[in-house]
Amino acid sequence: MMAHPDTLRELLDRYEKLRARPGHPQELDDVSYTLCVSTNTRDIREALRAAREHIASAAQAA
């Protein structure tokens, strides 16, 4: 089961903000882990792809 698109959007936003400002490695690790769990993946690259695809497909269905 995949997280709700709104939740994924929030996680992606947090991830991108943390990547843009170094100095918060634990927070970045935490949001990366949460993205992986929320998308049922084990790799952040896969999680980002899956989250973006799920958000896009939900937008098309609406």
Image (cartoon, helix red, strand yellow):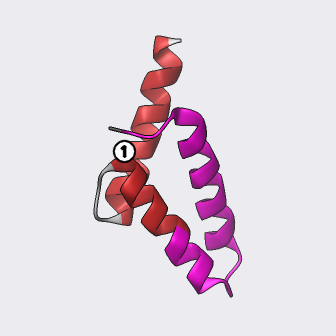
Image-quadrant location for residue 37: bottom left
Task: Where is residue 4? Give x, y as percent.
Answer: 50, 35
Task: Where is residue 56? Give x, y as percent.
Answer: 48, 29
Q: On the rendered image, what quadrant is the N terminus found in?
A: top left
Q: Nearer the viewer, residue 39 or 18?
A: 39
Q: What residue range appears in magenta?
A: 2-30
Identify which residue is drawn at 48% across, 16% down: 60
Q: Predominant secondary structure in magenta?
A: helix
Q: From the viewer's perspective, is residue 48 above or below residue 18?
A: above
Residue hosting label 1: 50
Assess whether residue 9 is covered by the magenta stretch.
Answer: yes
Residue farthest to the top, as pictured: 62
Identify which residue is drawn at 38% across, 39% down: 2
Task: Where is residue 48? Give x, y as percent.
Answer: 43, 53
Q: Residues within 10 Å of mark 1 (few under 14, many from 20)?
A: many
Q: From the viewer's perspective, is residue 20 above or below residue 25?
A: above
Assess whether residue 49 is covered by the magenta stretch.
Answer: no
Q: Secondary structure at mark 1?
A: helix
